[in-house]
Amino acid sequence: MIESLLVANRGEIARRIIRTARGLGIRTIAVYSEADAELPFVREADEAVCVGPANPAESYRNAEAILAAAKQTGAQAIHPGYGFLSENADFARTVAASGLIWVGPGAEAITAMGDKINARNLMAAAGVPVAPGTADPAVTVEAALAAAEEIGYPVMVKAAAGGGGMGMAVANDAAQLTAQYEQVRGFAERTFGDGSVLLERYFPRVRHVEVQILGLADGTVLALGERECSVQRRNQKLVEESPSPALTPEQREKLLAAAVRAGEAVGYRNAGTVECLFDPATGDFFFLEMNTRLQVEHPVTELVFGIDLVEAQLRVAAGLPVQFEPSTLASQGHAIELRINAEDPKRFLPGPGAIKTWVEPHGEGVRVDSGYAEGNVVTPSYDSLMAKVIVYGADRAEAIARAKAAVDAFELIGPKNNLPFFAELMDNAEFVSGDYDTGLVSRMR
């Protein structure tokens, strides 16, 4: 097993990784920005190194500073968490070239799936269903307009190098497409350094369903069930649950098989997620993207399968067998995750500030992965995620009841937060019925 691990991330995911690593007897090293010096993950690591100021480009995305910290502390491996450098193929390649263990898929897989157009084409060749769309970048607005006529409106305009719900817009006609094309292209150039744009058919009433895959050290690719991620604002997830209430057993079998083919097509190792759109009207699903890292919502998979995905990641990275017998794995019960963000519960605009009161819920079937504590300050420098409340029940009804109780019990005063939204959601008829789609939040607002 790995003996020392540097966690190249912050907040709740850094704490989450540190918790498992220390349980395995692995020495843990945190890197932190000046703004995060007082956060729990810094003191919970065995060692911590400041890698720069609050600006992520000068700290958490500063590959040179992170590699220097690894050398300084004698780290044997680097776990990137999610976001920041987690899907940076050049960084993964440099880590490996430096003689360190990269806890994630190989740089080749990250590269292959990092460009959405390339990923679409690879998946289509592997027999994974893809939505109607462009096989090459739309390099001009005229090319985009011609492609949209062939695909049919409405279309989704997407940054080819984007992710996390960023760099996306819907166009219902040629006039909207002309405006959205320039907007997405400009955003993509500024944010991702790549202005390539692709178009896909947009489905107004669709569900977002993803599959957790795990590529083992021996080359086997496992599909560890699916997660429903359709409660979203601005194309970004707020709630995830497993299993999806939308799928029949037959649909689930096809979806999981397609996800395995997707992983096998790129020789995938370690944890990753195959994201799909599911049309409940037809029962069809389409490949959306592959996230070549651990997902924010991985705990719901852990609860229904009774496994530790971070431990599995570390074992695979070390070339070891996983801690469970793959042939006996089966999903049991139901899990739901709520992302507790520092944002107002109506318009979901960021609301950073000092935390005056922080009392986490607890009880049977309740887990909290948090990045903050009372007295900490949520700054505007990073994502607004403060904590994740994950609940487990014997069935979906029990999980919803426990989620509702956990929201009521969470005492949080200081930053604006979306707990009131979740209280509303737990009583929403669409959500409770399980018959909802990605437009649910907009209908509630």
Image (cartoon, rainbow, N blue to C red):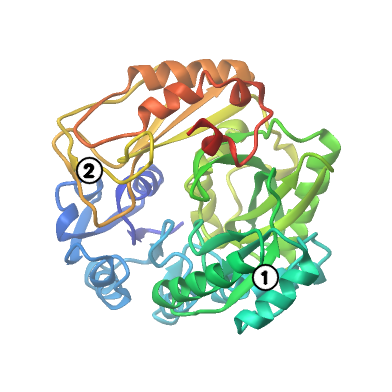
- Observer-nearest of 201 and 257: 201
Q: Quadrant of residue 332?
A: top right
Q: Residue at x 76, y 48 (%)?
A: 256
Q: Residues within 10 Å of mark 1 (few under 14, many from 20)?
A: many
Judged from the image, the secondary structure of the residue bearing numbered disc 1 is helix
Q: Position of residue 315 (x, y in %)?
A: 53, 55
Neighbourhood count class around disc 2 (C-alpha, 10 Å): few under 14, some 14–19, many 20 upward: some
Nearest the camera: 273 or 165?
A: 165
Give the residue type that dot 1 points to.
Ala
Dividing the picture into quadrants, the one containing residue 250 is top right
Q: Does residue 134 show up? A: no
Q: Quadrant of residue 169?
A: bottom right
Q: Residue at x 23, y 51 (%)?
A: 46
Q: Position of residue 352 (x, y in %)?
A: 23, 44
Instruction: Tell me the distance, in whole angstroms, between the alpha carbons under discs 2 and 1.
Output: 37 Å
Q: Looking at the picture, how far across and down is residue 428, in whole percent?
A: 55, 21
**Rendered position, 38 above or below 166:** above
* Disc number placed over residue 40 in the picture, else none: 2
Q: Are marks 2 and 1 in contact (CB under 8 Å)?
A: no
* Label 2 SS: helix
- Label 2 vs 1, first from the N-terminus: 2
Residue 89, numbered circle: none
Task: Please name the residue that numbered disc 1 is placed on.
Answer: 119
Q: Amino acid at mark 2?
A: Pro
Query: Residue, x 37% and y 25% (percent of image)?
Result: 420
Closer to viewer: mark 2 or mark 1? 1
Give 320 or 413, whichever is nearer the viewer.
413
Residue appearing at x 60%, y 26% in the figure: 431
- Can I make out residue 154 in this image? yes
190 left or right of 374?
Answer: right
